[in-house]
Amino acid sequence: MQSYLEFDFKINPLNPWNEILMAELIEIGFDSFTEENDGILAYIQKDIFSEEQLQNVGIMHREDVQISFTYQEMPNINWNEEWEKNFSPINVEDKVLIRAEFHDPDPTMHEIVIQPKMSFGTGHHPTTHLMIQQMLEMDFEGKKVLDMGCGTSVLAIFAKQKGAAEVTAIDIDEWSVENSIENAQRNGVELKISKGTAENLGNEMFDIILANINRNILISDIPAYVSVLNNGGKLLLSGLCFFDVNDILEVCTSQGLILENKQQREEWISLLLKK
């Protein structure tokens, strides 16, 4: 079992900064969280923790929120069991239920069954909800779809279930790739799953690109997405906070993308754009 560090972050004010901090910590390797009344407990494998990366997390330097922390090394425990204790199903408009195998099924809703493991972050629940919410209204029938930063591949699985002809799922994390393969099998769908980044896209073209990542990666990678998006194709983005929208739209506009729909849940935003 891996040795973990437990960070106790105190956050003032708590909302919306607790969710934002979790999202930023995920990007530097933190993989599980417990929400507290005055902050969050965050966990990271000891051998991958970087103090420099933590100090460079943007939210730590904002003037409108105060964040302090202490940390300690944790005893070895079964972290998959901890995930199961803390993972709750995601209900999207009483139409789609994202649940684990140990949750009771609901025959009244479309279900996506995943084993969350370490590749599913509590902080991403609102953005997953937003992506699924937008996808409910989109036409995937016969389309070629790319899911960038796929995580558990719940979005890729849903795209395939909605009739996509071919779905490619890419993530930089080996754990996510393995988990995606398992989840595709669990839901009876076929996905093309690989480890990589936008630099590995090549020349294959897509009709729809899904990217639930974060502001900095999106700003960097949107030109690469546009280069492999067919004319008339759709780009659906999330992982964005409300204060990120103008910066993202500036990049999108410069790449010839047109905003079709914007949705917000709590402090999180999703954007649907057309090339």
Image (spheres, grey):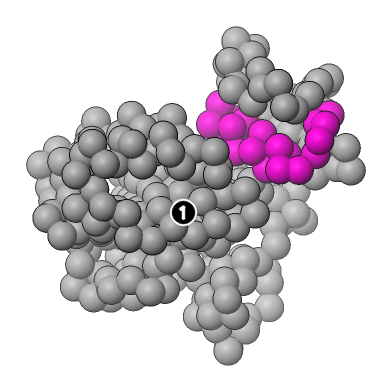
The quadrant of the picture occupied by the N terminus is: top right
Q: Is residue 76 above or below residue 169?
A: above
177 vs 144, left or right, is: right
- Disc 1 marks which residue? 270
> Is 40 in front, or is 111?
40
- Above or below: residue 198 compared with residue 209: above
Q: Residues within 10 Å of mark 1 (few under 14, many from 20)?
A: many
What x and y, as percent, mark residue 136? 42, 73
Q: Which residue is most to the top?
A: 52
What is the total number of numbered labels drawn onto the structure image? 1
Residue 200 is situated, as x and y percent measured from the top left of the image, at: 22, 34
Q: Is residue 169 positioned above or below 3 on the image?
A: below
Asked if residue 54 is positioned above or below residue 222 in the image, the reply reads: above
Name the one closer to the observer, 147 or 182: 147
Q: Is residue 11 magenta?
A: yes
Q: Is residue 237 left or right of residue 144?
A: right
Quadrant of the rendered image containing residue 228: top left
Coordinates of residue 102 in the picture (x, y in percent): 68, 69
- Residue reaching furthest to the bottom: 108
Is label 1 in a helix, a strand or a loop? strand
Residue for point 56% across, 26% down:
28
Q: Which residue is rendered at x = 10% and y = 42% of the image?
A: 203
Rendered residue at 71%/37% (across/down): 17
The residue closer to the viewer here, 3 or 159, is 159
**Which stretch appears magenta?**
10-29
Residue type at tag 1: Ser
Report which quarter residue 104 is drawn in: bottom right
Task: Pinpoint residue 150: horizontal percent, then vertical percent.
Answer: 41, 49
Note whether residue 184 is visible: no
Q: Is residue 211 visible?
A: yes
> Which residue is at a point 23% across and 36% down the rendered structure image?
254
* Corner quadrant of residue 164: bottom left
